[in-house]
Image: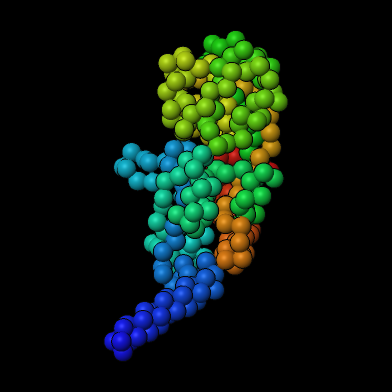
Amino acid sequence: MKLLLKIFFIIFVFINFCGCQSDIEKDVDLLTKIKDKKVFLVGVNKNSKPFAYINSQGELEGFDVELIKEISKKLFDTDKIIEFISVTPSNRILSLNSKEVDIVISTMTITEERLRIVDFSNPYYMTGQAILVNEDSNIRSGKDLNGKKVGIVLGTTAATNIRYIASNAIIKGFKNYEDAFEEFKKGNIDAISTDDVILQGIATKSSKYKILPDRYSTEFYGIALRKDEYSKNLKLAINDALDIMEKSGKIKELERKYNVQYRR
């Protein structure tokens, strides 16, 4: 009987100790946790040239990639602690809120709808939705998309914007830009619509493609964080880093390097 009581006592102490450890960990904010563990989990869309893509050497590069590396250097004195985790527009919020990643930097537009479930840093880029068509297409403006097949990437703001532009457009959703572009090349869709800077990356692949001149939205990219007190200090630190980089001209330097024009 005494042995049984001892066993129960040991189990009780162990459970309470683990519980205390869990509570302690919960009290440590995300910024401190990253500093202590020296691991910074960053969600990025590796199929969004020129913001994040795999180059000819098989390395990840792009505007978003370099931006977060610079932020990491300012917050943690190194960018070597970053672990880039691949996300898509359709799963990036889930990856963030399930704690698979600490933040998401993925050409992600700040919207009222998204602000209900995630938090954002201050904006670091402004863009607008545009339309890509073949050079010989008879589509001249957004109104001409009525009755046409338009490729968009699921999880982006593109579908909502297209409905305002052409309510009778036939919207075809894809998992990523690469899949949409493949269908576009085959002639299975008539146009692709997304942020102009992403379409520029596609248009440079051939002189057969053109981007129509109109822009149908004004959208601000932000770095997404979980909507909790745990992430508050990290958000403040990221905002400070962005402010320093804007004032120093570092962000403009990255814009020139990747040929992306901020619509200031």
**Quadrant housing the N terminus:** bottom left
Measuring from the top left, give residue 135's x and y in whole percent.
53, 15
- Image quadrant in which you'd find residue 27: bottom right
- Residue 66 placement (x, y as % from top left): 47, 52
Residue 65: x, y in percent? 46, 50
Q: Quadrant of the C terminus?
A: top right
Q: Residue at x 55, y 40 (%)?
A: 260
Residue at screen point 59% across, 18% down: 170
Q: Nearer the viewer, residue 192 or 59?
A: 192
Residue 259 visible in image:
no
Q: Is 131 above or below relative to 246?
A: above
Vertical placement of 113 versus 205: above or below?
below
Is 7 or 45 nearer to us in this picture? 7
Please provide percent x and percent y for residue 149: 55, 17
Q: Going 52% across and 60% down the picture, which residue do you hit? A: 71
The residue located at (52%, 31%) in the rendering is 153
183 relative position to 8: left or right: right
Residue furthest to the left in view is: 3
